[in-house]
Image (cartoon, rainbow, N blue to C red):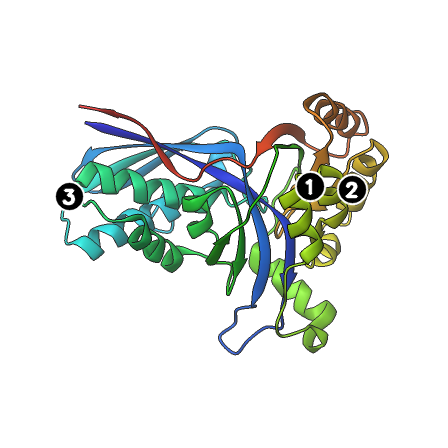
Amino acid sequence: MSIRVRAPGKVNLSLAVGRRQEDGFHPLATVFQAVSLVEELVATPADDVTVEVTGPQAGLVPTDGSNLAVRAARLLADATGVEAGVHLAIRKDVPVAGGMAGGSADAAAALVACDALWGTGLPRSELARLAADLGSDVPFALQGGTAVGTGRGHLLSPVLSRGEYHWTVGLSPRGLSTPEVFGAFDALVGAAVDPDPVVDDALLRALLAGDAEAVGAALSNDLQHAALELAPELAETLAVAEDAGALGVVVSGSGPTVVALAASPGHAVAIGRALLDAHVVAGVRQAVGPVPGARLVAERG
């Protein structure tokens, strides 16, 4: 028997970051959108919990106990008393260490796949609770669509959003460590940051109206300056996308992936071509959002 699940990467349409707290975390107020770059995971019975990873940048993903999908499977087993193992075969499509939550998508996919494989039958609400224990972005990879995230980003409220959004994704030749980006953020702004970040109402109104131009104008990321400090070359990537007529362009999450909102699928291709011609990216992808969260694709006996 095998279970196949797909889970999406994400872009942060906005990311407001609050002052670092005593527990080391920063309060966040963000708007997530799930996009059509997806991780595919196939779960099959095994004696232990193991993982293999294929696809772009697969060699950068750990395959030991630190792998988020492995941690998700073990967490579900512990929570439900399951003693069976599982082999997780992951086909990557989301950039690694790129600020698009590929590892979180793997974890969400593992929760859904193992729940089906082991017949544990947990409601989505319980899977979401387990997801929050694994990482701030895992609950959204489970839910998908468009949502406001608060707390560490794990407390989700669905957002009413009309229309389809076309993205050009500019890939960086190197990743950025999320803790390093937050460390740079603290060094740059420190105690001057508002302790209670909020989501911009203009972005929520634009999404409700399905106004892509207004969404583009409202894109924002408090971590972008920190990402640019660590990877100054991203400034040129942002500038080329802007010159190509992007409705808006921003570093996604902690970076270094740059996402540009396009007016149409053809415009997304043109922005990608401009980025490649300027030699400011390692590659480009086109994506559409919003898309659903982690979902069962096929089950074979």
At mark 1, the secondary structure is strand
Say which amino acid is labelled 3.
Ala
| Residue tagged 1 | 258
Q: Do the residues labelled 2 and 1 touch (CB within 8 Å)?
A: yes
Whether residue 249 is visible here, answered yes or no, is no
Name which of mark 1 and mark 3 comes first in the sequence.
3
Residue at 48%, 37% in the rendered image: 8
Q: Among all residues in the image, which is located at the extreme front?
A: 209
Residue 169 position in % (x across, y down): 65, 34
80 to the left or right of 181: left
Check the image and report above or below for 208 versus 274.
Answer: below
Residue at 77%, 34% in the rendered image: 280
| Residue tagged 3 | 84
Name which of mark 2 and mark 1 comes first in the sequence.
2
Residue 53 position in % (x across, y down): 40, 33
| Label 3 environment density (alpha carbons within 10 Å; few <14, some 14–19, many ≥20) | some
Residue at 81%, 29% in the rendered image: 278
Of the pair 224 and 151, the residue shown nearer to us? 151
301 to the left or right of 261: left
Distance CA(mark 2)–CA(mark 1): 7 Å
Residue 238 shows which numbered tag? 2
Distance CA(mark 1)–CA(mark 3): 41 Å
| Label 1 environment density (alpha carbons within 10 Å; few <14, some 14–19, many ≥20) | many
Say which amino acid is labelled 2.
Leu
Residue 277 position in % (x across, y down): 80, 25
